[in-house]
Image (cartoon, grey):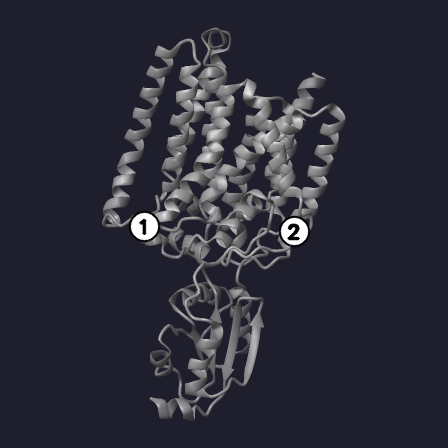
Amino acid sequence: MRIDRTKIALLFGPALLALSTRLYGLADKPLWLDEVITQKRANLPLPALIADSLHNVHFPTYFILVRAFDAPIVDEWMLRLPSVIFGTIAVLLVAFIASEARTPRAGLIAGTLMALSPVEVQFSQEARSYALLSCLVLLALWGLVRIAKYSAAEVAEARPGAARTGWIAYAVGTVGALNVLLVSAFWLLASNFAMIVIVRRAVNRTQLIRNWLVMQAVILIVWLPGLAAILLATHENSLRGYNWIPSSTWQHVWSVVSAVYLFRISDLTSFALFPAPVPGLGAAVVALALFGAWWLRREPKLLAVIGIAFLIMPAGMLVMSIFHPVWVPRYLLWSTGPLFVLAGIGAAALPRPGFALAAAAIAIGGIVNLAPYYRAETKPRWDLAAAYLAAHARPNDSIVANNGFAKYVFGAYGDRYRLEEPILDGGNVVRAAARIAPSGRVWVVFGRVGQTMRVPESDYLKQWSALLGAPAATVRFGRNVVAFRFDPPHGARDGAS
């Protein structure tokens, strides 16, 4: 009984740690553009929600699910709670996978790494579908590991329940993931590559191949209708929704690699990296993963399943980025799990004193490295701007946001803080200036809302200064949002119009 309790603690301890790191500060950071889209879409009538999702190259699955947690007025905590739940389950699954492939000690290390990974915490506090996708892919990966482990005829006969559980987990996870985001197609590809290795080393090949073909047929039957609906809704131009992704320069590629795999904290909108309190932590994890892969060479089926699951996503995204930029952290998220599994296997292969040292270093270093994330400004502070304007704007004042997306996010927080004045779209400065009140003050609010920034702040200010003169006041809200106040009379504007 004592051994069973130890195993439970080793596997569920990281999940409890994950729940703590994901609930802590859950509502401290404001919603950004994508999360506001989630909040607005979840409040649409169901037919409109489905149509809007498909038109924007999304399956409606996540947005239907999040409706149960949402409200018309922004509530960051409740809106992000589903991601916390799925992110925590993903940590538990990583611990299960590593334990299945090696020992519970491997599960402890793998789960702890996943629980303390800044990028995993970040997207588990994000009101988008990436934590859900990662959870489903990891469920499928756990199932495939069990299929690989129990595919030998004599083992399958000894433990039929384990093999059956593997097939069910693989099917449920894969079907679920494919109906959440298109990028999960890489998992389908990875699992088929891994199955080739499993079949080549299996004794009962005929039955294994038959089961696999039936499973793939079922998966495709369930997935293809939704895929066809997306292609029809986007008029066969499914890449049009990815125009915001930066070009894949070496600097951008490295910043994404650092954030996803090397335990660096990054800005969600600009991809800029923050200083790392423990700069060598990511390199140490990679070294453990390489050692784990080397140790797992004696189990080629397991190495193939876990290794291909890790490699397929970054390799596929890099190849796609040659033709169209798609290299961003969110699409690589589920590939961190296999990396941490390998690192856990590597740590478990160390001698007992070495394992204890590695476990302590990972726990302490991971916590120290993650701590700055909670106070880092990883999302633009449109909430502070809306609260300020609600308190300081007068009835005849005009409020202008720098573009339609900024107006969209600003308006969501304007509703929360009861900002009475309407917000104008300042994408065209001359047109917006023609609509401002002639006798009131003008507040021009400029900031980043997503990954693209088409006009620099200085250029945008020059356009307004040419019409309204120099601003009477400048108020900054964090690093990415600023409000310029122009006081009447607006003689320069009247003359220009």
Residue sitting at 35 percent across and 75 percent down? 428
Residue designated by label 2 = 276
Quadrant of the rendering where the C terminus is positioned: bottom left
Depicted 313 relative to depicted 487: above or below: above
Task: Please provide percent x and percent y for residue 281.
Answer: 66, 42
Q: Position of residue 150 (x, y in %)?
A: 48, 14
**Residue 364 visible somewhere in the drawing:** yes
Ranked by sequence position, the earlier of labels 1 and 2 is 1
* Residue at disc 1, secondary structure: loop
In the foreground, 6 or 395: 6
Q: Is residue 422 above or below residue 39?
A: below
Q: Which residue is mark 1?
A: 239
- Mark seen at residue 488: none
Q: Amino acid at mark 1?
A: Leu
Is residue 260 depicted above or below 461 in this figure? above
> Helix, strand, or loop for circle 2?
loop
Amino acid type for the residue under numbered disc 2? Ala
Estimate the spatial distance between the alpha carbons at disc 1 and disc 2, rounded to whole Å.
Answer: 34 Å
Left or right: 364 in relation to 176: right
In this rendering, would 437 be left or right of 240? Answer: right
